[in-house]
Image: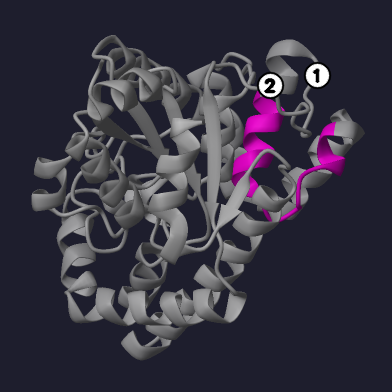
Amino acid sequence: MASESVIKRRILSTMSILAIVGATASGKSGLAIQLALQLAEIAQQAEIVNADSMAVYRGMDIGTAKPTAAQRAAVPHHLIDIMDITETATVAEFQTLARAAITEIQARNAIAIVVGGSALYMHAILDELKFPGTDPAVRAKWQARLDAVGSEVLWGELAALSPQAASGILPGNGRRIVRALEVVELTGEFTSHLPHPRYALPGVVQLGVALPQEVVTERIAARVDRMWDDGLLDEVRHLEGMGLRSGVTASRALGYAQVLAHFDGLSTADEAREHTKVVTRKFSRKQLAWFKRDSRIEWVEPANFVAYALRRLLE
């Protein structure tokens, strides 16, 4: 009769993708590593796929709370430190890279643990979601227009071209407005609403880290204070010299944008710290609102998370 570990290994191998979602500072990465190490104890390999849109950038370590070198040595991680800060990370490209990583992991009979707080990126990885093509020249034209007139004026131009597209985009979201105008010019239409979620990949289970909002708020404050203590200002100053300000995506990351504003004399260091806490809290609430709309996600408290995930996999 097969041993217990062999039986578990056979069962676990049928469950190829576990997605861990939740708010910023909820401890997702740590729980994913704990789970992977637990799986290793029963001879089941697991590897982690990053679904955080900012952890892809080399050098952005402190502000993105990347796993440490020791953690990444203990458990294989994918899609971390794969881009320069001057490059623009797109959801479409991330979807392609993440799915390729998952395919490689599955080929090794390992479980892919997809971890991240970027709801759109997670949706793109797991669900049926297609992206219109892009044209750098058209994108540059609308980006220049945004720089010249501002997001609210450009939103008005989008509304004149496509009221349906504009209805789902906030006037202050310049990046999405530029993308919508690019797609409208290239294809004649653009929808700002995502399709009903349906998994594009087999064997997906999504678990959410359940924490009260007040606990999330406390963790965010502690994380931002730790970022400052660990030298975020020095990190941003170093990255500034490497072209951070020219990075359309990287320069807008939480914490980094606030520190750059401080360097521009728009705030003190302490004001930048507090502003980072405020915008991170707002972002976390937005994250959770998006995730909570997905009825497929099973919410589990951190204390029981790893045990529940193992039990869920064994089902």
Residue 274 picture location, percent across and down: 44, 85
Q: Does 175 appear in magenta? A: yes
As drawn, the label of residue 110 is none
Element on which disc 2 rests:
helix
In the picture of the structure, the residue carrying the numbered disc 1 is 189
Q: Is residue 241 above or below residue 144?
A: below
Taking depth in this image into account, of 176 and 154 the one nearest to the observer is: 176
Element on which disc 1 rests:
loop
- Image quadrant holding the N terminus, namely top left
Residue in the picture at 63% in, 22% down: 199
Marks 2,1: beta carbons within 8 A: yes
In the picture of the structure, the residue carrying the numbered disc 2 is 183
| Residue 116 seen from this side | no
Precedes in sequence: disc 2 or disc 1: 2
Residue 239 picture location, percent across and down: 20, 56
Q: Gap in Å between the C-alphas at discs 2 and 1? A: 7 Å
Say which quarter of the image contains residue 100: top left
In the image, the segment drawn in magenta is 165-182
Q: Does 261 appear in magenta? A: no
Q: Is residue 22 left or right of residue 195?
A: left
